[in-house]
């Protein structure tokens, strides 16, 4: 492996940095999503909706206290602003949650883009080196040096593509998790708004003309 790394030339060092950064982000995001999954509490979310339907504010406060479910946080934001702009409050809270979920995804996307480009740079440098050797040798009198340049060209390309391919799958998976979470937040936020509108209509009928 060491000989393979050295054979790739100087471009292998930034490629190594890219691989370390990508691996770090993948591990961090994997731990993040595992934690999010553990903290999810769909039963509590449904209970909050039911308690809101019956205007049991103290019960809601007690239930959501200490909850780390992102859906609960969005609903609580809407409940706290129910007399002003419930929808916008939940939209803002959901935006903050999505921003937190997308953290470092841009870094991983950059590594996926940069790694193949660095591989191509190494390829060009290897080919230039090979032609330089051929020019200095006046022919193919130094085949080892020529093949070393070709090896550098192939190694950097393969390394750059490998980093990009291996990082692409986690990147797509993390993006799909963000989309799923956004869909869940939208669904429950809509449910809360429907309950709120029904309550307002019922209160309007009770008050009468």
Image (cartoon, grey):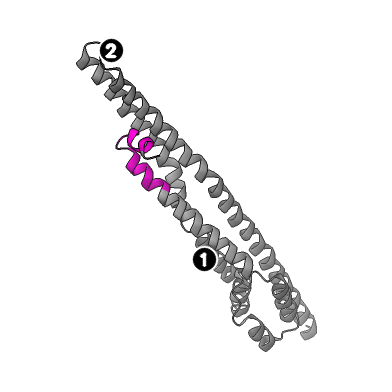
Left or right of 27 on screen, residue 10: left
Quadrant of the frame with the C terminus: bottom right
Q: Is residue 155 above or below residue 22?
A: above
In the image, residue 10 sits, relative to residue 149, either above or below, namely below
Which picture quadrant has residue 207? bottom right
Secondary structure category for the residue under label 2:
loop
Magenta-highlighted stretch: main secondary structure? helix
Q: Is residue 106 magenta?
A: no
Q: Quadrant of the N terminus?
A: top left
Q: Judging from the image, what secondary structure is the residue with disc 1 in?
A: helix
Residue situated in front as seen by the camera: 167 or 202 = 167
Q: Quadrant of residue 158?
A: top left
In the rendered image of this protein, does residue 139 appear above or below residue 119?
above
Q: Residue furthest bottom?
A: 58
Residue placed most toward the observer, 47 or 162: 162
Residue 7: within the magenta? yes
Q: Residue at x 63, y 65 (%)?
A: 37
Q: Nearer the viewer, residue 88 or 72?
A: 72
The part of the chain drawn in magenta is 3-19
Residue that mark 1 sits on: 96
Disc 2 from disc 1: Cα separation: 62 Å
Q: Which residue is mark 2?
A: 140
Residue 156 in view, yes or no: yes
x then y, percent, for residue 95: 54, 63
The residue carrying pointer 1 sits among few (fewer than 14), some (14 to 19) or many (20 or more) residues within 10 Å by Cα, namely some
Which numbered disc flags the more N-terminal residue, 2 or 1? 1
User: Residue 131 location, x and y as percent?
Assistant: 27, 19
Picture coordinates of residue 103 (x, y %)?
48, 59
Q: Is residue 46 toward the left or the right of residue 2 in the image?
A: right
């Amino acid at each position: 492996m060491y000989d393979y790394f050295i054979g790739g030339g100087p471009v292998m060092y930034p490629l190594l940095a890219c691989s370390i950064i990508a691996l770090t982000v993948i591990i961090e995001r994997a731990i993040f999503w595992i934690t999010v999954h553990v903290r999810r509490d769909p039963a509590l979310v449904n209970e909050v909706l039911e308690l809101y339907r019956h205007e049991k504010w103290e019960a809601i406060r007690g239930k959501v206290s200490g909850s780390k479910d992102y859906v609960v946080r969005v609903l609580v934001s809407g409940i706290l602003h129910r007399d002003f702009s419930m929808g916008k409050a939940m939209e803002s809270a959901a935006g903050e949650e999505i921003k937190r979920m997308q953290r470092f995804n841009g870094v991983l996307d950059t590594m996926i883009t940069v790694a193949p480009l660095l591989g191509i740079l190494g390829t060009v440098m290897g080919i230039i080196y090979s032609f330089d050797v051929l020019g200095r040798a006046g022919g193919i009198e130094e085949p080892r040096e020529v093949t070393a340049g070709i090896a550098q060209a192939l190694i950097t390309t393969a390394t750059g593509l490998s980093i990009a391919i291996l990082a692409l799958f986690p990147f797509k998976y993390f993006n799909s998790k963000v989309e799923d979470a956004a869909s869940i937040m939208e669904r429950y936020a809509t449910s809360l708004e429907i309950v709120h509108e029904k309550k307002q209509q019922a209160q309007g009928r009770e008050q009468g003309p």
